[in-house]
Image: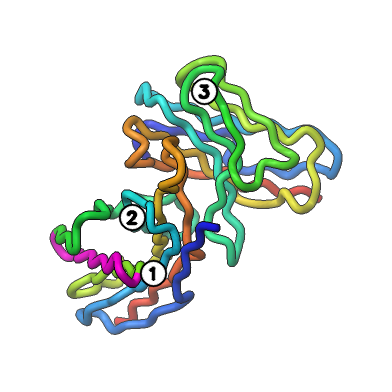
Amino acid sequence: GEDVEQSLFLSVREGDSSVINCTYTDSSSTYLYWYKQEPGAGLQLLTYIFSNMDMKQDQRLTVLLNKKDKHLSLRIADTQTGDSAIYFCAENSGSSNTGKLIFGQGTTLQVKP
Amino acid sequence: DAGITQSPRHKVTETGTPVTLRCHQTENHRYMYWYRQDPGHGLRLIHYSYGVKDTDKGEVSDGYSVSRSKTEDFLLTLESATSSQTSVYFCAISDTRYEQYFGPGTRLTVT
């Protein structure tokens, strides 16, 4: 079935780049997403990429998609302490037309000053 | 939070009691979703709605029912709460099916 996997934890120093990785199994997914969750809050849509794209850049965020390997990454340039949060990768369930999302377990990003 | 509110924000209830969580949106979006978030599982879809009175099951629907009698409201009911339903519940809305926006969540504890 559909599955999304992420590493659970990443620690970086303020000012460094962060790279959060994700693998997925559903090759029919049309969109892949990155969400951010701060403590006690809901999920904030950061960015998403259409499956026929390789890369998408949005200010400090760069998303890379390798469809052959079913690998998605989120790069945060010049990471700040305010970027500390849990980051979720998600794919839309390509087998349905209802926008159902399949989420990874989330990667906790810790940014040290 | 894109015009989405959830109520209550926190609830403690006893095993066996019925519980209803409410999601309210002011965006007039067609699609609405209920997810639960548990450690180690990310978010999992419980039920979703693609219009008034049109709902369907997600991957973890057992023990839950939903209703949508108005575009703006999507209710999630636990008919007889169990401890395994202790979780954080998130509602999401979408206009296009491709961008989902999440509410602030409801933390439910079943004792």
> Residue at label 2?
A32
In the rendered image, the vertical position of residue B49 relative to residue A68, given as above or below? above
Q: Are marks 2 and 3 on the same chain?
A: no
Give B91 or A84, whichever is nearer the viewer: B91
In the rendered image, the vertical position of residue A6 relative to residue B71, given as above or below? below
Q: Position of residue A75 (x, y in %)?
A: 24, 71
Residue farthest toward the right in the current orientation of the protein = B16
* Label at residue B26: none
Mark whose residue sits in front, 1 or 3: 1
> Residue at label 1?
A22
The alpha-carbon separation of the residues under discs 2 and 3 comes to 27 Å
Q: Are marks 2 and 1 on the same chain?
A: yes
| Quarter of the rendering containing residue A99 | top left
Residue drawn at the location 37% of the way across and 26% of the way down? B29
Classify residue A76 as left or right of residue B10. left
In the rendered image, the vertical position of residue A100 relative to residue A113, given as above or below? above
Looking at the rendering, the stretch of residues picked out in magenta corresponds to A59-69
What's the chain of the residue with tag 1? A
Which is more N-terminal, label 1 or label 2? 1
Classify residue B34 as left or right of residue B81. left
SS type, badge 1 = strand
Give B25 or A14, whichever is nearer the viewer: B25
Mark whose residue sits in front, 2 or 3: 2
SS type, badge 2 = strand
Give A113 or A6, whichever is nearer the viewer: A6
SS type, badge 3 = strand
Q: Residues within 10 Å of mark 3 (few under 14, many from 20)?
A: some
> Residue at label 3?
B73
What's the chain of the residue with tag 3? B
Say what amino acid the circle numbered 1 marks.
Answer: Cys
